Each structure stands twice: as structure tokens, then as C-alpha cells.
Amino acid sequence: MKKIILNIGIILIMIILLFFLTGCKENEENEENNINNLTNSNISVEENNTNIINNNISNQQNNEISISNDIEQADSKNETSISKNDNEQVNKENETTENTQKKTTFNVGDYVLHYGKYKGSGTKLIDTSVVSSSITIDLKEDGTYTYVSTNQEVSKNRSGTYKIKSNNVIVLNDSEPLEYTVLGDDRFIERQSSGFTFYYQEN
């Protein structure tokens, strides 16, 4: 009887040990599963973070490309604007040159005179003596003139405006106007007593 009880006791102890060992293994498996789940979760979070970082980098690169394109477009517009401004300046200079060329001459009747200096030389009888002189008349584009004589006894220096009259006549306005008849291109003669003939002096 004692042996039976002893055997039953041993069997119970073994059963208890088996239950205990089985429970430990289940706990270990649960812990391993928990650790694996945590590890996988961390890996997933890291992958998500990596994807976010890559997306941010991609967005930055796209922004940089967009900014670069904007800068290139702005530069292109500036170059086009500069090119247009250069063309406008060239056109204005050409117009100015053409206008200047148009204003280098003017017509008196059938003849053409240049703006600029005309020189005449001759003599004039003053009392009982014959006096020589050279006179320079500068006809300007703005309708004014200057008149310079090397001998003030023959004629005094003067300046003022001039006008064109009919019959090929130029009048130098002053308190005592002087009139000149145009004889040909770039040539006219004084109608007063001296009769000096004036010729255009090319620069």
C-alpha cells in the first residue's frame, strides 16, 4: 500500500513538473513573439522615417530645380529685355544720325547751302582809301548766325537770326539787315556796296 501511495505521489510530482515546464515554454514563446513584434514594429517605423526623409529630399530637389528654372527664365527675360533696349538705342542713334544728315543742308530757291561757315574777302572804299577785309558768316541749324569781320571799319561784328526770302535771298537780321543773293550751291554774294562773294568752308 505504501508503494502504491509512493508511486502515486511520484506520478503527481512528475505531472506538476510537466505542467510547470510546459507553462515556461509557452511564456518563452510569448516573449519571443513579443520581441519579434517589437522588432518588426521598429523596423517598420524606421522604414517609414526613411521614406519621409527621402520624400523631403525629393521635394527639396524639386524645389531647387523649380528655382533654377525660374532663375533661368528670369535671366532669359532680362537678356531679351536688354536685347530690346540695345536695339531701341541703336534705332534711336540711327534716327539721330539720319536727322543730323538731313539737317546738314537747306534749300534757297533752286540752290542748296550747307549749314556752317562761309568766308568772303575783298576791299571797300572808305572816304578816300581802299580798305581790305575778310568776313566769316556762320549759318547755324537753329536759324541763328554769327558774323565776324577782320576789319571793323569795313563791317562790324554781329549776330542774330537769319531768314530766307524769295528770289534766292538770305537776310541776316540786325538793326541794319544785310542781304545776300545765292548765286549757286554753297555760294552767295553781298547785295550791299562791298559786293563780297562768300564760299562754303568745308571742315
Image: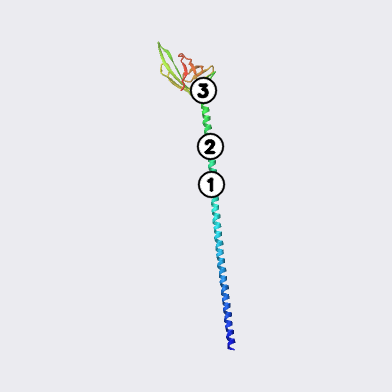
Instruction: Report x, y in % for residue 13.
Output: 57, 81
- Give neighbour class at mark 1: few <14, some 14-19, many 20+ (Cα, 10 Å): few
Q: Residue at x 53, y 42 (%)?
A: 75
Q: Amino acid at mark 1?
A: Ser
Q: Is residue 186 above or below residue 74?
A: above
Residue under label 1: 68
Residue 83 marker: 2
Is there CB contact under 8 Å for labels 1 and 3? Answer: no
Q: Secondary structure at mark 3?
A: strand
**CA distance for labels 1 and 3:** 56 Å
- Res. 133 image quadrant: top left
> Which is in the foreground here, disc 1 or disc 3?
1
The label number, if any, that marks residue 156 in the structure image: none
Find disc 3 in the rendering and name its residue: 105
The N terminus sits in image quarter: bottom right
Which one is in front, 27 or 199? 27
> Type of residue at label 3?
Thr
Sequence-first tag of 2 and 3: 2
Disc 2, SS: helix
Of the two numbered discs 1 and 2 in the rendering, the one whose residue sits closer to the viewer: 1
Residue 169 x, y percent position in the rendering: 51, 17
State the separation of the CA atoms marked 2 and 3: 35 Å
Query: Mark 1 vs mark 3: which is more N-terminal?
Result: 1
**In the rendering, at what x and y percent does residue 30 appear?**
57, 70
Helix, strand or loop for disc 1: helix
Q: Quadrant of residue 23?
A: bottom right
Identify the residue at image location x=54%, y=48%.
65
Towards the viewer: 81 or 66: 66
